[in-house]
Amino acid sequence: MKREGIIFIISAPSGAGKTTLCKEVIDIFRNLRHSVSYTTRQARPGEVHGRDYFFVSPDEFQRMTAAGEFAEWAEVHGNLYGTAVKTLEEYRKSGVDVILDIDCQGAHQLKERYQGGVFIFILPPSFKELRRRLDNRNSDSVEVIERRIECAAAEIKESRWYDYIIVNDVFSKAVEELKSVLIAERCRTRRVLDAVAEMFDIT
Amino acid sequence: MKREGIIFIISAPSGAGKTTLCKEVIDIFRNLRHSVSYTTRQARPGEVHGRDYFFVSPDEFQRMTAAGEFAEWAEVHGNLYGTAVKTLEEYRKSGVDVILDIDCQGAHQLKERYQGGVFIFILPPSFKELRRRLDNRNSDSVEVIERRIECAAAEIKESRWYDYIIVNDVFSKAVEELKSVLIAERCRTRRVLDAVAEMFDIT
């Protein structure tokens, strides 16, 4: 059945396991891609322009913002990140589903624009477990961890306006749930009705 | 997380494979039951009262209808079938999900009553395949098959107001899709928000 690509918007507080979860489902589904964002930050070693990000200058980013070329954009730790309308439109038209791994601020901008978008929030099982995971990363200072926990508390409140909430307690269960949301949304009547009407010659 | 049981209403034209699909997912999920209906038809050999159906007299069925004890009821081939409000309420309160395998007529009655219900329509891949499946049953006369195909054409039009449409072409794929709808609906924000608010002390 020919259908439009679906936009899945996934948000989570840092440490909830969003990145690993997204990577897992993108590996499973052939018809699902990770949306490539534009950013003004410097490429890190190994990052490839057009695969990991589109790396652009602050001037170019500014021009794109002014021209309304972003579906959403946000400043994070002094760098700008944005998703181009063009990128999303290309996926939609080609029938490829896309995952946008973005914060609540960006998700909010998309909520108004994309009625057909599916908004998924990933939660840690508790603040205690979130702290344990952030501690185990060994990459952040105590201050940074404290700030992340505070941010998490604020972000979790945003979960209420998402369509789905997945609690990442047991990883395999969270993967199963995210997979299920992706499959179920493809079966939503409003997405398949045109194809069904054609199959059965319903007018 | 403590939550209310979900009511899944599944309809399909005869020959779409609904019964087999429902049986398959009920075997998979511990927390999912097949709703037991009331009927005025005679029990067939092997059928158990309270497991397969609640077998009642036409008078008793009539009394229950008049008393508003049915969430939905319908007459099918001269027999009456109905789902008791009490049955659904018990499942809902005990947090057990339930599958109602009913026709469009009954589903329509539930649509208005149960806002939280999930309506799923199972389709055959084509009229041609539907006819092949009905022929292969070897249990129905040519006239009965013709009538079933005609009914199917009318029923398929009803699929437009269901929440999900699953095309049962490859059985394993249809099982995966039905499973996914059941899991995804359990992650819907409106169903888990109370539990999440409690977990994270959100007011």
Image (spheres, coloured by chain):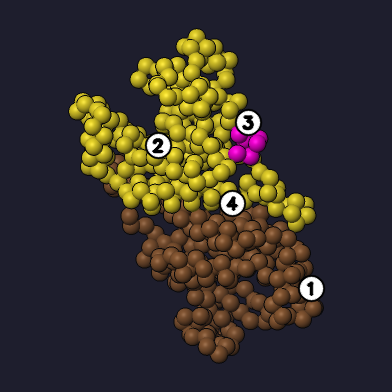
Chain colours: A brown, B yellow
Q: Which region is colored magenta? A: B91-96
Q: Measure the alpha-carbon separation of dots 2 and 3.
A: 23 Å
Host chain of mark 1: A
| Pick the front one: A203 or A141 | A141
Q: Nearer the viewer, residue B139 or B182?
A: B139
What residue sits right under mark 1 in the picture? A146
Q: Secondary structure at mark 2?
A: helix
Q: Secondary structure at mark 4?
A: loop
Q: To which chain does the residue with label 3 belong? A: B
Work out whether mark 4 precedes mark 3 in sequence or the reverse, and give the earlier one. Answer: 3
Mark 4 or 2, nearer chain start: 2
For the residues labelled 4 and 1, the Cα–Cα distance comes to 29 Å
Residue A103 in the image: above or below residue A163: below
Mark nearer the viewer, 3 or 1: 3
Q: Residue furthest front?
A: B46
What is the distance, in whole Å, between disc 4 and disc 2 at their CAs?
A: 25 Å
Q: Is residue A48 above or below residue B99?
A: below
Q: Amino acid at mark 4?
A: Cys
Q: Which residue is mark 2?
A: B19
- According to the picture, the residue beneath numbered tag 3 turns out to be B90
Q: Earlier in the sequence, mark 2 or mark 3?
A: 2
**Residue B45 in picture, x, y percent from top left:** 40, 22
Q: Note whether residue A183 is visible.
A: yes
